[in-house]
Image (tube, coloured by chain):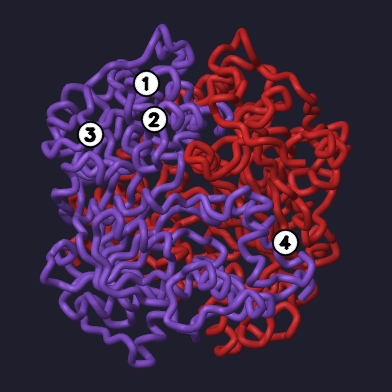
Chain colours: A red, B purple
């Protein structure tokens, strides 16, 4: 099955920067078709240009490391993944939303089942890779052990094992963008979208501009991880309760417990709510999206921290968003309107408890056709010392709360630590 | 200072896919020059093509989101960052290694001080952005509170405040690759490196191939976060002790506490060692590198988990690396030989305690000229239940240990959980 190694020199890959010479036209993709065969596989291989039917390649930004591996001779340029035993540990879908070309446009609903659905093409030599992988795991977090000790959680031996081990199903998802759908969702012309994606990345992927017939783009950005607590089948079952936490990455809090924001405490609170729902016969879903610092990246985030803490009057809730705008030009680049796709992939039509106060997330989810019964705010006692600035600023800006929203004057009085403390 | 908004339509950006028409030649970069003015600023702007002197743009993969923001009209295409009050909270360097063109080739040593060093150019209208941001924070992790309760750590009110709040200086660093240096480090021709980076990413940045005079590349990959515990000045002081933990991201363990690996427990152990060293008058450094799943990405990681747990005989230490090779073609794509750059940026010449068992990391660090006095293994009682497979396989493959390395037969007996448990 494995052919001779091909050095980059011998490769016959034609520069995709020469539009008149080469835009691949391989298996046609019919986005939104219910049958994976009719839909066609996403082929992002770099082994055979003639097989490609997308712009970009698999593994998001890790493709850059793969390129280093080939350059340095550690990876054979013609390596094709051996997918033996890698198929999903749990079956997800298909769900009706998979057959709606407008509902899911930022991931490939068939991304986990390519080994099964496109086996005949794989055998013909096509290098078809999964963009989704589903496995099972046990996880354990000190805060959950504490919740058990305090009697808020119970080790039932099934959802949660002795010692606080939580049994989860988890899925990793790479972004797969159907460009006409992305353009429609963002209310922009597809041509304009392609041009901006090319120009404002410093000239990444000229194919975006020169190959308008290639409708799918595998962007080199971070993906999504889904943690399912309880029986996966319960997620799409309208007779069973569902709790969801949609969480955007914040490495400083999620891993290191920074006290300037509520990210990890709110994440853990969401997991706790998921466990309770699973133990009541339903399911819990935590969606973790790699969008560090509101998708502005961590360098911008730290620049903004400095600007907030050094501005006249110190770090104040009334100026919370303004400093981000000065540095980044916007308050937020997360594009929550793309986020509900993963919920539709899971077959979600109703969320009983949405553990999020974000109005942007709530609006995106409900406008995508998912019913939300209840919104769960972070309990006051979980808000870290220096995070009052963030939480009061967000509540004043429209975040969900049942408590009082502060006036502009009161907001100015909510202050955080300075840089010298 | 802010000019009129420019829509993508009006932009005069020339397709960088047309090599004969346009490769920018702006301020020349003299990599390795000790004086930032002689070195020249890294200009990755997309506002004025004539100002650019690199391939790619700032913010790593988040440039893709910035492009969406421009396309959807939320971000002015001509936004230039207002850097008021964003300068480093703590001064790092300059250090002798900054003036060595071979020592630091994957980040810009002057990345944090651009606002100061290139102020005159900024005033002339150049859009020069920091690739490094340095701030201060308080962090708190449940495991550290536990270490205080158990008497292993002391709240001294300075390094660690009451309640377990740890005072840190932290830096976020974007990758800035000097391509001739990367090629030299990986022992490959620069031309071959450029071609592989273009071809094996599916045609990203033709400038890599068509603009050989552009020597610096801002790759759209994740960066680095540095956490400094204790006085930053102690790091490069040969008279003071230094503890270092070099940690590659593992979201499933670092955030969610998956029990299949030792990542978070070892990270926390490293932070504990850093605190002890800082309290003894030295400093501790934790380097967090965004290289999920050995830089193979999380989809590949989960595929490998399934293959490991389903193979004949179950998940076994003797077959730990083999399954990764089947799927990914290699065991590891982290390229540890690039990792010591951040240590040289910090001015490190000697590490008293290196909290890592990785032979790849140890070799990379010592071969880059840094002396390592002692290596600290993860204590046995911190190894989670299902992670024995990983740790025994790694020890057998050359990881540092003071305990016995198992034979091939014994390795086959170290087994992990199946997918159905």
Q: Between residue B292 and residue A409, name the one nearer to us.
A: B292
Q: Secondary structure at mark 1?
A: loop
Mark 1 is surrounded, within 10 Å at the Cα level, by few (under 14), some (14 to 19) or many (20 or more) other residues, namely some
Chain at numbered mark 2? B
Q: Residue at x 33, y 51 (%)?
A: B172
Q: Which residue is mark 1?
A: B212
Q: Secondary structure at mark 2?
A: helix
Q: Secondary structure at mark 4?
A: helix
**Which label sits on residue B31?**
3
Q: Which numbered disc flags the more N-terminal residue, 1 or 4? A: 1
Q: Is residue A221 visible?
A: no
Q: Quadrant of residue B307?
A: bottom right
Q: Residue at x 79, y 34 (%)?
A: A125
Residues tagged 2 and 1 counted as in contact (Cβ below 8 A) = yes
Q: Where residue B103 sits in the image (x, y, percent)? A: 25, 46
Q: Which residue is mark 4?
A: B306
Q: Between residue B200 and residue B186, name the one nearer to us.
A: B186
Q: Quadrant of residue A409?
A: bottom left
Q: Where residue A119 sits in the image (x, y, percent)? A: 85, 42
Residues tagged 3 and 4 counted as in contact (Cβ below 8 A) = no
Q: Are marks 2 and 3 on the same chain?
A: yes
Q: Which residue is mark 2?
A: B190
Q: Taking B154 as reference, is A216 above or below it?
A: above
Q: Quadrant of residue A59?
A: top right
Q: Are marks 2 and 4 on the same chain?
A: yes
């Amino acid at each position: 099955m494995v052919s001779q190694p091909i050095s980059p020199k011998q490769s016959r890959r034609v520069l995709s920067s020469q539009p008149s010479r080469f835009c691949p036209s391989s298996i046609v993709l019919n986005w939104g078709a219910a049958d994976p065969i009719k839909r066609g596989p996403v082929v992002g291989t770099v082994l055979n240009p003639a097989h490609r039917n997308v712009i970009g390649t698999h593994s998001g930004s890790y493709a850059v490391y793969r390129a280093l591996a080939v350059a340095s001779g550690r990876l054979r340029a013609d390596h094709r993944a051996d997918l033996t035993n890698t198929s999903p540990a749990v079956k997800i879908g298909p769900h009706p939303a998979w057959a709606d070309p407008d509902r899911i446009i930022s991931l490939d609903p068939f991304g986990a089942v390519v080994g099964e659905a496109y086996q005949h093409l794989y055998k013909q030599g096509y290098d078809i890779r999964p963009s989704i992988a589903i496995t099972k795991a046990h996880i354990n977090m000190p805060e959950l052990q504490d919740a058990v000790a305090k009697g808020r959680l119970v080790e039932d031996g099934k959802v949660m094992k002795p010692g606080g081990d939580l049994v989860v199903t988890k899925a990793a998802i790479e972004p797969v963008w159907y460009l006409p759908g992305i353009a429609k969702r963002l209310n922009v012309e597809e041509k304009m979208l392609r041009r901006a994606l090319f120009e404002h990345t410093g000239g990444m992927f000229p194919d975006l501009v020169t190959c308008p017939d290639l409708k799918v783009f595998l962007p080199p950005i971070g993906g999504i991880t889904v943690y399912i607590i309880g029986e996966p089948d319960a997620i799409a079952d309208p007779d069973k309760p569902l709790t969801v936490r949609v969480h955007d990455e914040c490495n400083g809090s999620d891993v290191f417990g920074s006290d300037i924001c509520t990210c990890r405490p709110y994440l853990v609170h969401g997991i706790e709510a998921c466990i309770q729902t699973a133990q009541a016969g339903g399911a819990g879903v935590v969606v973790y999206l790699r969008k560090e610092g509101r998708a502005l990246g961590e360098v911008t985030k730290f620049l903004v921290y400095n600007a907030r803490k050094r501005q006249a009057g110190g770090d104040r809730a009334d100026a919370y968003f303004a400093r981000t705008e000065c540095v980044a030009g916007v308050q937020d680049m997360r594009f929550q309107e793309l986020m509900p796709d993963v919920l539709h992939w899971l077959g979600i039509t109703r969320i009983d408890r949405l553990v999020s106060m974000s109005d942007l997330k709530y609006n995106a989810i409900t406008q995508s056709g998912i019913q939300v019964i209840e919104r769960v705010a972070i309990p006051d006692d979980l808000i870290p010392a220096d995070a009052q600035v963030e939480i009061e600023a967000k509540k004043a800006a429209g975040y969900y709360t049942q408590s009082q929203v502060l006036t502009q004057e009161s907001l100015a009085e909510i202050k955080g630590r300075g840089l010298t403390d």
